[in-house]
Image (cartoon, rainbow, N blue to C red):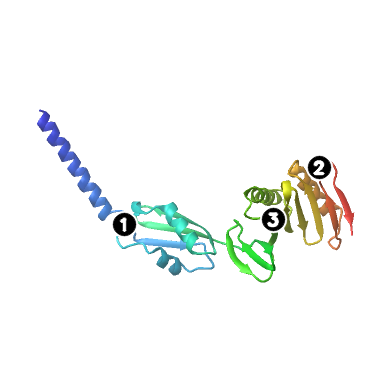
Amino acid sequence: RFIKRLLSLLALFAVIAVAFYFAMKVLFIVKEIEIKGSTIFTPKEITEFIAIPEEENIFRIDADELGKKITDEFTYIESAQVIKRLPEKLEIVITDSVESYYTAEDDEYKVYSQGFKYLRNSAEPPVGSVWLDLDISDEEKMSTAKQLVELFEKYGLADVTKISVGEENVIGAVYADRFEINFGTMLDIDYKIKMCKKVLEEKVTTEEHGTIDATSGGEIVYKRQ
């Protein structure tokens, strides 16, 4: 009886092994790769780079690793989401990098994407980008800058052209190249941003220049220049 059970188990394992081999060699073979989302790179450029081998099984592909490989290779690709569409299709959704920020040092500018990915050096400040006046290698200061970017977007404070993070995380911003804003620290920063937005929308004209002191949080002081 033991031998019969053993033989049955071996036969079952053999069937499973054959089925697995069949699935890996015949089924779930990548036959289609769809690249979409990029306006900078063509699907052919990306497909040729990833070079998926013929008759590659879709389950052998590490989607996260492949996405990272693409973003590492293509400077102006911000992200690449690899989706397995069973049984035989790979869909790769590309998000292009957009020049959004820059730092300045010794008459040279380093340009960064919307996700703070380094893109290139420039002899001139890139048009339409926000100046990050901070040490971008300082993780604490960069974390503060990222929080500010999120809050500016959350509260609709558009047209910020400069973000500064100094010692002890003292923060400031320039709005539309016309208003210097001093926030002090991150304490009560949500309220400070909302009140600054209110002042800029309701108290000043589009031709005015000035400074806004939002260091106290409880009171916003606006001075025209």
Compute the Cα span from label 1 to label 3.
49 Å
Q: Which of 207 and 75 is in front in this view?
A: 75
What distance separates the C-alpha of mark 3 from that of mark 2?
A: 23 Å
Q: Residues within 10 Å of mark 3 (few under 14, many from 20)?
A: some
Which residue corresponds to the image point at 73% horizontal and 46% vertical from the top-left? 168
Mark 1, secondary structure of its residue: loop
Nearest the camera: 29 or 143?
A: 143
- Say which residue appears at 73% left-offset and 58% top-offset: 162
Q: What residue type is labelled 1?
A: Ile
Q: Can the viewer see residue 139?
A: yes
Give the CA separation, mark 1 to mark 2: 61 Å
Given the image, on which type of amino acid does mark 3 rest? Leu
Q: Residue 5 is drawn in which quadrant?
A: top left
User: Would residue 161 be found to the left or right of residue 28 on screen?
Assistant: right
Residue at label 3?
Answer: 134
Secondary structure beneath dot 3 equals: loop
* Disc 1: CA contacts within 10 A as few (<14), some (14-19) or many (>=20): many
Residue at 40% across, 57% down? 90
Image mark for residue 18: none
Q: What residue is shown with label 1?
A: 29
